[in-house]
Amino acid sequence: MSDKLRKILITFSFSFVLLFISLTIPTNFASVMPGTMSEVSSNIKIDGVENAKNIYTTSVYYQTRMVPLIRMILEADNKNDIYPMTPYESSLSSIDDYKMGQISKKYSYYSSIINAYKEASKVDSSITINYEVDGLLLYYRPSRMIDLQIGDHIIKIDGVEVNEDNYKEVIRESRKDNLPITIKREDQIIEYVVKYTKDDPTYISFYPNIVVSSSNPSFELPGLDSTTGGPSGGLMQTINIYVSLLNLNLGDLKIGGTGTLNLDGNVEKIGGAVQKIHTANAYKMDVFFIALSNHSEVVELKKNFDYYPVENLAEAIQVLNTKIIK
């Protein structure tokens, strides 16, 4: 074999190896990219009520453990956010991530229903809702805690029975070692002690388990059966329900936004705020709501819509009232 041919083969082999690595070997980097706007109406059905058709939630695309070539391509667009995954993110399996998304989505839907019905009842007293917080649902646990399952129904923490009056305090007080919890799993009652280590100090976390006992009008949540997950659609789901219950006329306005909503009606920070602004621009929204706590991240971005950072649902409703066509 001639030296020239040998050099060509070595160069080709080296290039092939680099290409193979760039196409197949995952990295510990993730990306958040602009996504889509989706009508809320298909996710919520209220008996005898026509759903508003112009309220949209905003989603982004996530990609984790990108191969080098994809990372290089995505880094070329400044609308994308490329970042090293945290130890917390790296520890999650795709199954865990899916289960967690479904739990946070369930909380988001029920919190939206409750907040919207409460606000609408101030205008129409025939609108009612009754609910309770029946313990907590386990949202995250380190993978080493193999006896705990994401979605476990936690009825007691540190000997305290969890209910609507105390769940926030119980969650705050749960960040300690040697924490006894009581789990109701199907027909079993399981006692477990949560222990942390220096190598894995990440705390377990929860969402309230909300049970609606009655409402007028009644409702269904077909969106719970979808494969999408996460809580960031809470604010827009609530606005959709409120507008629909009161049959408010917002004309042809395309109203989008993002933000989680807790049971107290506060709008909380979400991830991917920058990419969601880019998404709203691309989909030509007329109005866009976002959590006030996200405002500093996006204040410098161009916005082709009326932009409203809000701290709670009441502020969002005040804005809506200025958009109603009498």
Image (cartoon, rainbow, N blue to C red):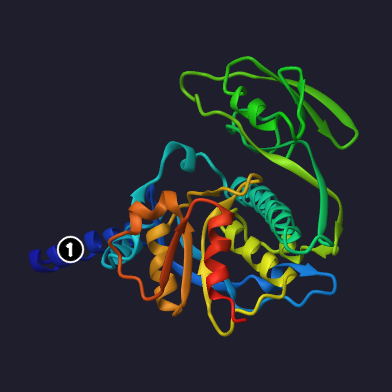
Residue in the image at 69% along x and 51% along y: 111
Q: 72 left or right of 40? A: left
Which image quadrant is residue 75 in? bottom left
| In the displayed structure image, the side of residue 304 where residue 324 appears, left or right | right
> Which residue is rendered at x = 17% and y = 63% of the image?
11
How many numbered marks appear? 1
Residue found at the very far bottom of the displayed protein: 252
Which percent across, then down, holds residue 41? Answer: 68, 73
In x, y percent, where is residue 25? 39, 53
Rendered position, 249 above or below 236: below
Amino acid on which the number 1 mark rests in the picture: Thr
Name the residue: 81% across, 61% down. 127
| Along the line of sight, the residue nearer the viewer: 208 or 263 | 263
Q: Quadrant of residue 163?
A: top right
Closer-to-camera residue (267/74): 267
Estimate the x, y position of residue 97 in percent, counting from the top left: 59, 48
Image quarter of the N terminus: bottom left
Nearest the camera: 222 or 97? 222
Which of the two residues, 113 or 35, is positioned nearer the viewer here? 113
Q: Is residue 57 visible?
A: no
In terms of secondary structure, where does tag 1 sit?
Answer: helix
The residue most toward the top is: 178
Toward the right, the furthest residue is 187
Query: Could you tell me which residue is drawn at 74 percent across and 69 percent down?
Result: 245
Q: Position of residue 166 (x, y in %)?
A: 71, 28
The C terminus lies in quadrant: bottom right
Task: Identify the residue under disc 1.
Answer: 11
Q: Residues within 10 Å of mark 1 (few under 14, many from 20)?
A: few
Vertical comparison of 41 with 201: above or below: below
Q: Is residue 66 left or right of residue 243?
A: left
Question: Is residue 274 at least partly visible in the picture?
Answer: yes
